[in-house]
Image (cartoon, rainbow, N blue to C red):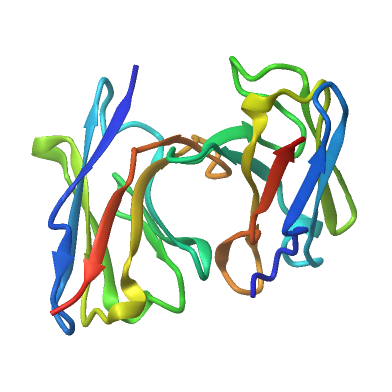
Amino acid sequence: QSVLTQPPSVSAAPGQKVTISCSGSSSSIGNNYVSWYQQLPGNAPKLLIYDNNKRPSGIPDRFSGSKSGTSATLAITGLQTGDEGDYYCETWDNSLISRLFGGGTKLTVL
Amino acid sequence: QVQLQESGPGVVKPSGTLSLTCAVSGGSINSSNWWSWVRQTPRKGLEWIGDVHHIGNSYYNMSLRSRVTIFLDKSKNQFSLDLRSVTAADTAVYYCARLDGSYVSFDLWGQGILVTVSS
């Protein structure tokens, strides 16, 4: 069981919006930047969001991130079938002295 | 652009050493980045193994620290992972990755290599 908690799955219709939460602690999310990764079926993870809310070059603005206290959220608007896959949050933990990943959330676009 | 490519045996015997290499192309391993290994299993999801920097610093997952070494080969522009005393629980897809210059995010990943621990 991960110390970064994500819902196992979320779903929404094409064109709709979905949010994925990531809950941590004061030693993890509360005091460190959060990153989000997208893993499409059969592929390696890909960086979607860094520094809580920044997008790397080439990532569409349909993807956005936010952080409040010890939780972070990834929002995806204008859902497309190509967005189906797994999404992971990640951060550093000052107490565990370790990099942590969330358990992952499977996105289904109905 | 910079690319990462893992290589190594697909099968390792129990109690043996899992050794993988990540070739860095299109850029230098002597850059300001850290170089990392991450593994993925259906049961545990993504698990950070450790990072190394060209100046010699390294950080490891505490749960694996006693069995892991990550090291650079600057002459070949690659970095490697040794995981000793492996068991079936070490069966996973192993990814090499690059941490950005701020040591915050994995901004580049290899394609991954499946390693199975089996006799």
Residue at image coords 74%, 67%: A27
> Which quadrant of the figure has residue A50?
top right
Residue at image coords 85%, 37%: A18
Q: Quadrant of the C terminus of chain B?
A: bottom left
Q: Position of residue A80 (x, y in %)?
A: 72, 23
Q: A62 and A94: which one is in front?
A: A62
> Which quadrant of the figure has residue B6?
top left
Residue at image coords 26%, 28%: B28
Q: A21 and A12: which one is in front?
A: A12
**Which residue occupies the extreme front position in the image?**
A110
Does residue B61 sit above or below A108 in this rendering?
below
Q: Position of residue A79 (x, y in %)?
A: 77, 25
> Which quadrant of the figure has residue B114?
bottom left
Q: Position of residue B68 (x, y in %)?
A: 29, 71
Q: Is residue B115 left or right of residue A74?
A: left
Q: Position of residue A95 (x, y in %)?
A: 66, 73
Does residue B72 sit above or below A18 in this rendering?
below
